[in-house]
């Protein structure tokens, strides 16, 4: 891999890791649903020029239902759950829990798409679950003062991400990924608008919240998708997907740097166990 591609990989991980920081900063002012409606609609509009191509318009016209399901479950619901979680959880901790997406993707693919898992992948799933267990150990308190519900929201968001990935693989595999992502983002964002209108914040969000929400939409979503799919074209899906392993490190780093979040030994241990499991699941090691 060329140095430029290596730097692009780190840049992509940095901006995706920053999405947890931007959610943490802006969600209290906006509320989870309005924030994600803004994020998805603005990101979808930023990517909308792709529909100037006839191929994109035909794909959307023929597959709009599948794209809408992908956007609502795979993106909108996931984003809303993560935003709700970051009302309480630190950006770094939320990014750590989010790293369990490959566990759900592999498990759902095995059950739904009948993809056969190798022995090392099964071990990886077990290790990934163990890593999540370490992260949430002693935290599943569902009382009013506990963080059990936000933690559960993060884990459910990961399930939705996994479902969305399998849905796209099953129903949208003949559509260019950037076209599919753009269509699903814009469609789901529009669907969310009336729900967001019913939950508008009582007062205007601060300038910092507006800037964070805009960065979340334009940088961490629209620009990130373009970078990701271009990286796939240059280095292949396997190498590009290794960005998953870097996101938690940046999520922790940005939270520590800008929000003075505390990094615990429990978080680091859970991260290392989970990452080793993900390496086995995605066949980065043990090929």
Image (cartoon, grey):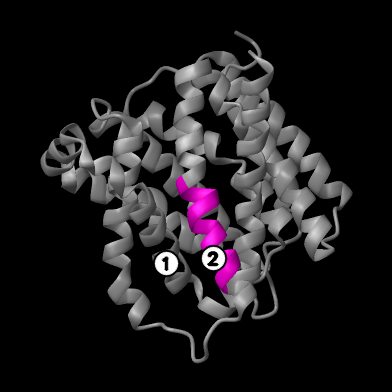
| Residue 71: x %, y % from top left | 33, 50
Identify the residue at horizontal 54%, vertical 50% (top origin): 219
Identify the residue at horizontal 82%, vertical 61% (top origin): 261
- Find out whether the residues at labels 2 and 1 contact each other: C-beta distance under 8 Å: yes
Q: Mark 2 or mark 1: name the one nearer the start of the chain.
A: 1
* Magenta stretch bounds: 210-222
What is the residue that sits farthest to the top in this orientation? 287
The circle on residue 24 is none
Identify the residue at horizontal 15%, vertical 35% (top origin): 54
**Picture layout, residue 284 above or below residue 181:** above
Could you classify mark 1 by the number of other residues whose Cα lies within 10 Å: few (under 14), some (14-19), or many (20 or more)? many
Q: Is residue 126 visible?
A: no
| Residue 67: x %, y % from top left | 25, 45
**Residue 147 lies in quadrant:** bottom right
The circle on residue 38 is 1
Residue, disc 2 = 213
SS at badge 1: helix
| Residue 184: x %, y % from top left | 30, 48
């Amino acid at each position: 891999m060329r140095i430029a591609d290596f730097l692009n990989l780190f840049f992509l991980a940095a901006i995706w890791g920053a999405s947890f920081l931007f959610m943490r900063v802006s969600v209290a002012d906006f509320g989870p649903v309005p924030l994600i409606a803004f994020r998805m609609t603005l990101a979808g509009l930023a990517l909308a020029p792709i529909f100037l191509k006839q191929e994109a318009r035909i794909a959307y016209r023929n597959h709009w239902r599948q794209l809408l399901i992908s956007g609502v479950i795979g993106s909108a619901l996931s984003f809303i759950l993560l935003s709700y979680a970051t009302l309480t959880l630190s950006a770094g901790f939320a990014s750590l829990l989010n790293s369990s997406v490959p566990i759900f993707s592999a498990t759902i693919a095995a059950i739904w798409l009948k993809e056969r898992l190798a022995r090392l992948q099964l071990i990886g799933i077990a290790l990934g679950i163990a890593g999540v267990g370490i992260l949430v150990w002693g935290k599943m308190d569902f009382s009013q003062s506990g963080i059990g519900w936000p933690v559960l929201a993060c884990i459910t968001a990961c399930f939705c991400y996994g479902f969305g990935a399998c849905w796209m693989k099953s129903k949208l595999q003949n559509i260019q990924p950037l076209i599919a992502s753009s269509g699903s983002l814009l469609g789901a964002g529009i669907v969310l608008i009336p729900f967001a209108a019913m939950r508008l914040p009582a007062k205007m969000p601060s300038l910092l919240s507006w800037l964070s929400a805009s960065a979340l939409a334009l940088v961490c979503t629209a620009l990130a998708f373009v970078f990701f799919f271009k990286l796939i074209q240059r280095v292949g899906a396997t190498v590009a997907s290794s960005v998953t392993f870097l996101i938690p490190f940046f999520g922790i780093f940005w939270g520590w740097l800008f929000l003075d979040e505390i990094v615990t030994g429990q978080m680091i241990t859970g991260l290392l166990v989970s990452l080793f499991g993900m390496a086995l699941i995605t066949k980065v090691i043990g090929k």
